[in-house]
Image (cartoon, rainbow, N blue to C red):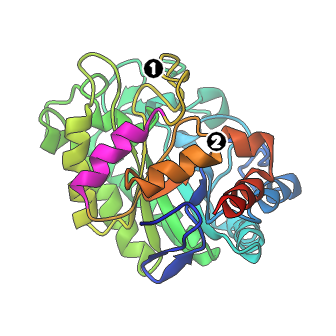
Amino acid sequence: MATLLDPLLVRGFSIRNRIVLPPMATGLAGSAGEVTGPLIEHYRARSRCVGMVIVEHSYVSIEGKAGPHQLGVWSDELIPGLSRLATAIREQGAVAVIQINHAGGKADPRASGTKPIAPSPVAVPGGFETPREMSVGDIERVVGRFAEAAERAVKAGFDGVEVHGAHGFLLSQFLSPITNRRRDEFGGSLEGRMRFPLMVVEEVKRIAGGKLLLYRLGADDMMEGGFTVSEAEILASKLADLGVDVIDVSGGLCGSRPPELQSRQGYFIPLAERVRRRVGVPVIGVGGVRDPYFADKVVREGRVDLVAVGRAQLEDPDWSCKALEILRVGL
C-alpha cells in the first residue's frame, strides 16, 4: 500500500514522494515570456520537499498567449532562462516538468496582437472575443509549434513535458462539443474531436523521447452538452497507448475551480479515480487539497497515485515540508 511519503519510479525517474506542485500562472515572467529572477525564486522556494514540480502553462506560439507576463516556450532565445529554471528546481531534489499550452479561443488579443483561433468560431467560456476557425493548415502548424516547444523544454534540461489539455484551452476546446462544431475529420464524433489532441501528443512524444510525458486532462466540462468523464476515460486509454507516462486530471471548460465544487476538498479526485481505473499509468488528483492527511488517504486508498496541492503551496512555500513532517510523526 503506497502512501504520500513513498517514492514513485516512472520511466526511470524517481519521484521522491507523491506531492506535486501543479502548474499555476504567477505573472512573474517577462513581457516576452522570459524567465525572471523572481520566477526562479518562486519555484526554488516550493521545490525543496515536493516530489514533482510542474511549471506553469507556457505558450508555444504568440497567437496562443493567454495573457501578459505568461511564461513562454515559443522561441529558442528563451532556452537559457528556462535552463536556469529547470536547474533551480532539480537542485532542490524535485523532478522538473514544464507545461506547454496554446490558449486557442481563450488567447488574449491584447497580449498576442492577433485574433484568437479555435476549432470553431464559437465564443469560448473565459475568452475575450469570438475566435477565427482554424483551417487544417492551422491545425498542422500548431501541432508543429507544440513539438518545437517540447524540443526547447528538453534542451533546457527539464525532466518532462506536460501537454495542457484542460481548463478550456485549445486542446480542451477541440474535445468539447460546445466549442467544436466542425464537420470535418477534426469534429463530430469523439474520434474526430480527439484527433488534434492525439496528434499533438504523438508529436511531443516523438520529440520528448526518454523524458517524462504528462497530459493534463480536462476530464469533464461540467456543462450540458459538453465533454464528459465517460469520453475522458476513452481518451485516457488512447493517451496511455501513445506513451503518456502520467495523466493529470482536472476540469474541462469549467476550468480549475468550478464554484459549485470548491466547498469540498479534492473535488476532482472522483474524476481522477475513474480515469485511473481505466489506464495502467500513474494518475494525479487535484482540487483544493489542503490537508496532508486527506492527501495521504486518497493515495493509501489507491484512488490516485500522486496528489497536486496548488493554492496551499502558493500561500505557504513550506507546505510540503510541513506536510511530510506531520505524516512522518504520525507513523
Most foreground residue, 90 or 77: 90
Can you say which quadrant of the picture contains the C terminus? bottom right
Q: Residue 187 location, x and y as percent?
A: 18, 35
Write the residue at 28% across / 37% down. Answer: 175
Mark 2: few, some, or many residues within 10 Å (few <14, many ≥20)? some
Q: Residue at x 68, y 38 (%)?
A: 311
Instruction: Answer yes or no: is residue 119 visible.
Output: yes
Q: Nearer the viewer, residue 251 or 70?
A: 251
Residue topped by disc 2? 291
Q: Is the residue 315 above or below the residue 259 in the image?
A: below
Dominant SS of magenta comes to helix
Horizontal side of residue 125 vs 90, given as left or right: left
Identity of the amino acid at label 1?
A: Pro
Circle 1 crowding by C-alpha within 10 Å: few under 14, some 14–19, many from 20 = some
Residue 226, labelled with which disc?
A: none
Q: Nearer the viewer, residue 185 or 305?
A: 305
* Magenta stretch: includes residue 268: yes
Q: Is residue 60 visible?
A: no
The image's mark for residue 125 is: 1
Name the N-terminal-most of marks 1 and 2.
Answer: 1
Query: Disc 1 and disc 2: Cα gap in Å?
Result: 31 Å
Q: Quadrant of the N terminus?
A: bottom left
At mark 1, the secondary structure is: loop
Q: Residue at x 39, y 27 (%)?
A: 132
Location of residue 150 in the rendering, given as x and y in whole percent from the top left corner: 50, 66
Which residues, given as a range, are shown in magenta?
A: 267-279
> Which of the two residues, 59 or 244, is positioned nearer the viewer here?
244
